[in-house]
Image (spheres, coloured by chain):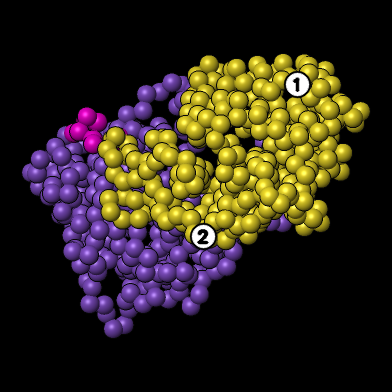
Chain colours: A purple, B yellow
Amino acid sequence: MRVEQLRGGVVEAWHEVHVAVVDARGRLVAGAGDPGLVTFWRSAAKPFQALPLVDDGVVERFGITSAELALACASHSSEPGQVALVRDFLAKIGCTERDLLCGPHAPLSERVAEDYRTRGLRLTAVYSNCSGKHTGMLALARHHGWPTEFYARLEHPVQQRCLAEVRRWTDVPAGEIATAVDGCGVVCFGVPLRNMALAYARLANTPIDPPLQFRIPHSAFRIVEAMLRHPDLIAGEGRPCTELMRAHPGRVIAKVGAEGVYCAVLPQEGLGVALKVTDGHAVASALALAAVLEELGLRPRPASLGPRPNVNTRGETVGELRVKGGLEQ
Amino acid sequence: MRVEQLRGGVVEAWHEVHVAVVDARGRLVAGAGDPGLVTFWRSAAKPFQALPLVDDGVVERFGITSAELALACASHSSEPGQVALVRDFLAKIGCTERDLLCGPHAPLSERVAEDYRTRGLRLTAVYSNCSGKHTGMLALARHHGWPTEFYARLEHPVQQRCLAEVRRWTDVPAGEIATAVDGCGVVCFGVPLRNMALAYARLANTPIDPPLQFRIPHSAFRIVEAMLRHPDLIAGEGRPCTELMRAHPGRVIAKVGAEGVYCAVLPQEGLGVALKVTDGHAVASALALAAVLEELGLRPRPASLGPRPNVNTRGETVGELRVKGGLEQ
């Protein structure tokens, strides 16, 4: 599977895509390229980094709302409303923006970025797309009485708790999970696409006969419910995760990762999806995910995620970006 | 050959590179991947689109300077000094900015782009990185008495003249040259990397025994001389073409193309280089070219074009972008 950029009738550039579609048993239902490719999960691991909030009783302790839980799973667009919600979440757990260890960056939404540039707004840690995840990590530390300093480090119990959760859901032994430092400073996890897809499939929690060995905790429902209820918080206006979830309400959770990774769960079908564009191209990964979801029955894909015209500086359409090939069984 | 992005010790993303190193006879001296890969030459074809200015007597007619000739071959950074020179060039041929058919875009230099954003400067056609090339095309039309309207169209004699020049230097028959519309609106040419490299090798004009069938016109000297004399105009402050040419004065002309294409000529060695990063990654293509040039004897590569640290939002170095592999004979 490839995403091709055409100019006139000629392929000018292309992006290789590897895909794994897996059921809750870990069976590879479909794939493309190398479903066993190991890469970093990064932002697509957020739902699993948020699970301890439910499992360990942090949600009850602080009265965390489903919107706040959704933001803990989100790569948000730094929209004013999203940032305000994260600030409330921080206040609720007795923290402030100064406790956040994520660094600032330009908003992932070009529209929001342009707006803030025009207004000369100073971007701080709470504007990071990961500020919800970081606030969740602070909440976890507060709840357990762990230090809120240095919570980003591998040896900190917050990261060890997240690692344990990743191991549990992916079935990859802890010793085989590669770790490195993420864009926002916390630990990120290198696992095969197939195992990322397995973790997402398990979130679907579809009854299977005979029942799975893996006991899906009730906490997973809370995460799934929070994400399904708040497509607007998972990413933001105009961004692919939000567009895909709005196009098929209740039928999909789509979660972008960094560097060309995309994951999804189809709760009704009981399937998890993980894909990687090898060169990290973000737009290509979103088009590829939309094509894969369409092949799995989520029709039609949103217009914004179909073949995308390539428009030059004069406003002329000179080619397009489009997915070529599909899933193999 | 690949450019790999590492996070920790793990390759997180990679960019495939195809390379052709060719002498003026068209002999493949070295390569990597598929030196016969067909792709669009785009901005790396500019020196050949500028050759008619010398060959047809346009330079003498209007008293075009070597700086103006360099700008006709350039993908400039829209620096104030560069834009002022293009405005002078336009005036010299009796045209104005309104005659330019290139569309506006953010400057290729992030520093210049940021400066203009801050100052609220309105970007017009003359700020296009291709405004020198377009001015050259207008000059060619003026000289021959062709209409200055619609000079971007394939059927216009300006584009036909450029096509003939591309055919002549690449040895690709006109019928086999794919054409499409470039980012700036003019015709762009799809040819194999090997033939792009041949065209650049011929610019070197190194005496060969027995002499070449291909008669290198004296005009080529003017283009080579103009580019070698003005590394600051070919791209701009801090950009790879300029850095490479400044690091090895007189020993190389490096010219970026769009979508991961890079070309170069080593006049002393009599070699032409063309490479393509298949996914179009611009930074990867610059690092790959620097590595290829180093392998061909241009040591050391500029520090800015060696392995590049990957720094996260907290300012931590979390990996690097680096070239893996090299030329094969």
Identify residue for label 2. Answer: B329
What is the quadrant of residue B223 in the picture? top right
Q: Main secondary structure of the magenta part?
A: loop
Using the numbered discs, state the Cα–Cα distance from disc 2 to disc 1 in whole angstroms.
42 Å
Give residue A194's position: percent from left, percent from top. 36, 68
Give residue A115's position: percent from left, percent from top. 49, 28
**What's the residue at 52%, 30% (across, down)?**
B249
Say whether residue B216 is left or right of residue A323: right
Q: Label 2 sits on what residue type?
A: Gln
Say whether residue A168 is left or right of residue A268: left
Q: Give the range drawn in magenta.
A: A95-103
Say whether residue A53 is left or right of residue A157: right
Identify residue for label 1. Answer: B64
Visible residue check, residue B109 = no
Q: Label 1 sits on what residue type?
A: Ile
Q: In the displayed structure, would residue B214 be above or below residue A214? A: above
Secondary structure under tag 1 reads loop
Depth order, front residue of B75/A112: B75
Q: Earlier in the sequence, mark 2 or mark 1?
A: 1
Q: In the displayed structure, would residue B25 be above or below residue B96? A: below
Classify mark 2: residues with Cα within 10 Å, few (<14), some (14-19) or many (20+): few
Chain under label 2?
Answer: B
Q: Which of pointers 2 and 1 indicates the residue nearer the eye? A: 2
Give residue B165's position: percent from left, percent from top. 78, 43
